[in-house]
Amino acid sequence: MSRLIVWHDGACPLCAAEIALMRRLDRRGAICFIDAQAARDEACPVDRAELLARFHASEDGRLLSGAAAFAAMWRAIPLLRPLGLAARSPLILSILERGYRRFLRARPKLQRLFREKRPTA
């Protein structure tokens, strides 16, 4: 089994929470998580701004973005694998991508709300 590489925005509270959950679910260690904020330039397959604007993953040497990257991550986690396999359907993937694009438009506001609700130490 090849290892999946996932780039995420470590400075985003929403992303950090989701990646923390995915790390807990990835009991087999099938995913290599890379914080695109902290990664060296040579570790970034595309421009860092692009990595931070959309979710990216590399599955079997193919760079994926958006809903396709999420689906690849889900396929690597046994509990979520059925969702990832369902997303191989072009129809399902297009629906997921539309939802992801809507989320991206709302992401800045959600980040602010998430930061406000988190207790400060």
Image (cartoon, grey):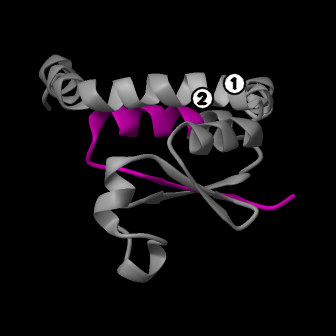
**33 to the left or right of 81:** left
Please state the horizontal and vertical placement of residue 114, each as a whole percent of the image.
22, 23
**Amino acid at dot 1:** Leu
Q: CA distance from mark 1 to mark 2?
A: 5 Å
The total of numbered circles placed on residues is 2
Mark 1 vs 2: CB contact within 8 A: yes
Which quadrant, please, contains the C terminus?
top left
In depth, the one of 26 and 66 nearer the eye is: 66
Residue 44 visible in the displayed image: yes
Please state the horizontal and vertical placement of residue 56, each as a whole percent of the image.
50, 52
Query: Does residue 94 lie above or below 12 as drawn?
Result: above
Disc 2 element? helix
Residue at mark 1: 91
At horizontal 12% and vertical 21% (from top left) the residue drawn is 116
At horizontal 76% and vertical 35% (from top left) the residue drawn is 88
Please state the horizontal and vertical placement of residue 111, each as a whole percent of the image.
21, 29
**Amino acid at dot 2:** Ser
As for residue 40 lying within the magenta part, the answer is: no
Residue at mark 2: 94
Residue 37 visible in the displayed image: no
**32 to the left or right of 101:** right
Q: Which residues are magenta?
A: 1-22
